Image: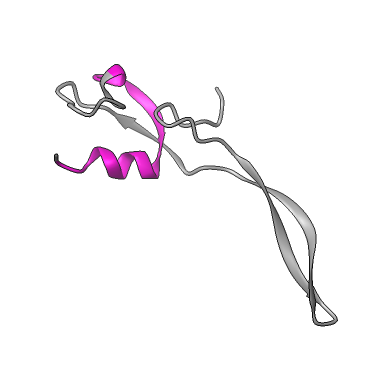
Amino acid sequence: MAKQCAICGKTGRMVWRLKKLRGKYHRTIKKRKKPNLQWVKIPIGIKRKNFKQFAGKKVLACTKCIKTLGKRK
């Protein structure tokens, strides 16, 4: 199972951690940031186009998509 949001396709990304050395910032540590994925069941009567194909299924979704899912149109 991939660490990827089923709805928007968000995946992990590489980021640099900045460390100050003698008054200047240096990119020292490269780190992988992963999306905050949660299991969520999509309701059957959903009207948003991004969520329609997942209606009635349980999927791994990022928290941004879950927040969008709760909004009323």
Relative image position of residue 15 (x, y in whole percent): 67, 51
Give the percent coordinates (x, y) of residue 66.
32, 40
**Magenta stretch holds residue 2:** no
Q: Residue shown at 55%/31% (left/top)?
A: 3
Q: In the displayed image of the protein, which residue is found farthest to the right? A: 22
Quadrant assignment for the N terminus: top right
Picture quarter containing residue 12?
top right
Query: In the rendered structure, does residue 62 fall within the stretch colored magenta?
Result: yes
Residue at the (28%, 42%) spot, across then down: 68
Which sits in the foreground, 38 or 14?
14
Left or right: 10 in relation to 16: left
What x and y, as percent, mark residue 32?
A: 67, 45
Find the magenta span and give its range.
53-72
Q: Quadrant of residue 70?
A: top left
How many marks overall? 0
Q: Residue at x 42, y 32 (%)?
A: 8
- Residue at 26% x, 25% y is 49
Q: Nearer the viewer, residue 26 or 58?
A: 26
Identify whether 7 is placed above or below 19: above
Question: In the rendered image of this protein, does residue 59 appear above or below residue 21?
Answer: above
10 lies left or right of 38: right
Q: Quadrant of the C terminus?
A: top left
Kindly indicate the quadrant of the structure image that contains residue 25. Answer: bottom right
In the displayed structure image, the side of residue 4 where residue 28 appears, left or right: right
